[in-house]
Amino acid sequence: MNEPPIAVLAGATGAVGSRLLDLLLARKDGTRVLTVGRRAPPGSHPRLEHLEASLDEFTSVLRDRRSTEAFCCLGTTIKQAGSRAAFRAVDLDGVVAFARAARASGARFFGLVSSAGANPLASNFYLRTKGEAEAAVEALNFMSLAILQPGLLRGERAEHRTAERLGQLAAPWFDRLLVGGLARYRSVPIRAVAGALDAAARLHSSGIRRLGPAAIEALAGDP
């Protein structure tokens, strides 16, 4: 009899990560979940364990742990981080450190929340950083890698971001103008991103998949 999956999750207290955590714990296959980060997610569950760690401690806390799948929902903004350097420390250095630790722990699947337009050669600092993170994770050669590239995330957040809230209100109308190549920038519900991550891990497919807004919602179904 196969043992239940062991999922390791970074960013479990964020908008996408918290919803993904609920989905992982609701699985019928008995998936065990390890969350890593400075803050533990609220509540408790018999199949949930939190490993307290700063970004530079991911490798040490996961060194003697085993996992079969890993999910990276780390992300901040330059405004929140306080500087470009601090932003890169999370969205590039932190992401790569977690991916390396997950790979060393045996994870065969890795799911990464990135951004529409991510490109390591982009002139835009945010998109370039996201693209560099994607390239670094891709180079680790996970058996299965799903990179989600949503546009604006729609849904409730723990923190209040006025600009994003206004963007969410306008998104349903603005999305209609994004056709052709611009469709990759359409907004996506937070619950759909979490659902697509969970579904991608359960597909057990090999290789690299990049999922834009339409593919994210299609894979998530109705999480």
Image (cartoon, grey):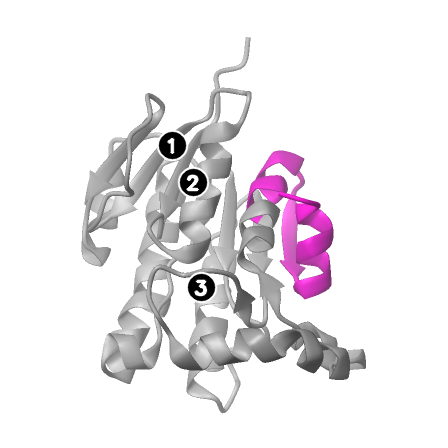
Residue indicated by mark 1: 33
Quarter residue 91 falls in: bottom left
Q: Which residues are magenta?
A: 197-223
Q: Mark 1 near mark 2, Cβ–Cβ under 8 Å? A: yes
Residue type at mark 3 is Ala
Is residue 117 among what the camera can see? no
Residue indicated by mark 3: 136
Name the N-terminal-most of marks 3 and 1.
1
Q: Mark 3 near mark 1, Cβ–Cβ under 8 Å? A: no
Residue located farthest toward the top when viewing the structure as drawn = 1
Q: Nearer the viewer, residue 141 or 176?
A: 176
Where is residue 139? Give x, y as percent.
Answer: 49, 59
Residue indicated by mark 2: 21
Q: CA distance from mark 2 to mark 3?
A: 25 Å
Is residue 42 among what the camera can see? yes
Where is residue 20? Give x, y as percent.
Answer: 47, 44
210 magenta-colored:
yes
Q: Is residue 57 above or below residue 84?
A: above
How would you rate the neighbour count of disc 3 (Cα within 10 Å): few for under 14, some for 14-19, many for 20 or more? some
